[in-house]
Image (cartoon, grey):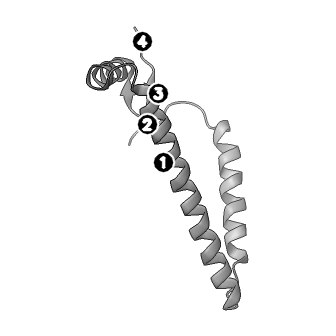
Amino acid sequence: MFTSYFLFISGGEIFFIMFIVVMVFGADKIPDIARGLGKGMRQLKDATEDIKQEIQKSAEKQGINTDFTKDIKQEIDKVKENINEVSGTIKRK
């Protein structure tokens, strides 16, 4: 049986959702919908990046030390690298 999970959704549920999407929108509209979603996600990412840059510039103008953010980012990157080393199942107590 197909037991792959993506975002806590099983393969059967993904298939059912895709079936409903095809029935509602039709197969010819799905690429346009996906393209629109992709553009929207890109615009959201660009807007988020612009906001981050504006906050960074404002903090630098006011003389606020922002070096701690770089340290935090480095620690997060280390954790991301080490997360691949974790294996086994997660058990609840």
- Provide the residue designation for mark 3: 31
Front: mark 1 or 2: 1
Q: CA distance from mark 1 to mark 2?
A: 38 Å
- Residue at the (67%, 37%) spot, across then down: 85
Which residue is at the front of the view, 86 or 70? 70
Q: Are marks 1 and 3 in contact (CB under 8 Å)?
A: no
- Residue at the (39%, 40%) spot, across then down: 92
Which residue is at the front of the view, 14 or 9? 14
- Provide the residue designation for mark 1: 40
Q: CA distance from mark 3 to mark 2?
A: 41 Å
Q: What number is the disc on residue 2?
A: 4
For label 3, count other residues whose C-alpha is less than 10 Å away and answer few (under 14), some (14-19) or many (20+). few
Q: With 39 as the anchor, is 2 left or right in this view?
A: left
* Residue type, mark 4 in image: Phe
For label 2, count other residues whose C-alpha is less than 10 Å away and answer few (under 14), some (14-19) or many (20+). few
Front: mark 2 or 4: 4
Instruction: Label 4: state its secondary structure.
Output: loop
- Provide the residue designation for mark 2: 91
Is 25 drawn above or below residue 48 in the view shown?
A: above
* Residue type, mark 2 in image: Lys
Which numbered disc flags the more N-terminal residue, 3 or 2? 3
* Residue type, mark 1 in image: Gly
Q: Quadrant of the C terminus?
A: top left
Front: mark 3 or 4: 3
For label 1, count other residues whose C-alpha is less than 10 Å away and answer few (under 14), some (14-19) or many (20+). few
Q: CA distance from mark 1 to mark 3?
A: 14 Å
Front: mark 3 or 2: 3
Q: With 20 as the anchor, is 45 left or right in this view?
A: right
